[in-house]
Amino acid sequence: MAKKVAVIMGSDSDFPVVKGAVEVLKSLNIPFEAHVMSAHRTPDAAAEFSKHAAENGFGAIIAAAGKAAHLGGVLAAHTILPVIGIPIKSSALDGLDALLSTVQMPPGIPVATVGIDAAANAAILAAQMLALSDPALAQALQSMKDDMAQSVAKKDAAMQEKVSSL
């Protein structure tokens, strides 16, 4: 059975950003669950979810949070699964506070961190982790990269036409 990805957001207001991760997971046919859990308002629920994530069939956890952004660290503290943090731009500091809170973890509690609001990259990173033991998913990721390369080649060809006509 394919491993699932947990997509945990600190607030439902994070969903417009997190939607990008959900769309990527769906496009790659990766089973997932999405939940709202707060590192500060529901710390016991977040810890309990994380403690049992592996036995519940998850292979990676994506944690999206803004401001103090402790969610990724709380989840990572209670599991050996890889946790990928998405710092959410949600404050006067333009997401820099969330980025630093997510990436600056103490030794032994890593949270892989993507760019501010980079939900699609979090899902791709989770897919790459799962693809280490899933050849079909690895092929789907390779196809995605091949499609990106073809798209850039087409754009380059169009640019060459524009430049040569000047």
Image (cartoon, rainbow, N blue to C red):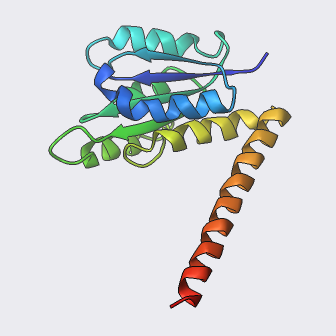
Q: Residue at x 37, y 15 (%)?
A: 37
Q: Is residue 64 left or right of residue 28?
A: left
Quarter of the image with the N terminus is: top right
Q: Where 54 falls versus 85 (above or below)?
A: above
**Quadrant in the picture for residue 19:** top left
Residue 40 percent across, percent down from the top left? 27, 19
Most foreground residue, 52 or 88: 88
Residue 15 visible within the image: yes
Q: Is residue 40 left or right of residue 157?
A: left
Residue 7 percent across, percent down from the top left? 50, 24
Q: Residue lying at the far front in this picture: please name it.
A: 165
Q: Residue at x 57, y 77 (%)?
A: 159
**Quadrant in the picture for residue 79:** top right
Residue 166 percent across, percent down from the top left? 50, 91
Most foreground residue, 119 or 64: 119
Q: Where 27 falls versus 7 (above or below)?
A: below
Q: Residue at x 27, y 45 (%)?
A: 95
Residue 49 percent across, percent down from the top left? 49, 11
Most foreground residue, 124 or 140: 140
Residue 11 visible within the image: no
Q: Is residue 107 left or right of residue 99?
A: right
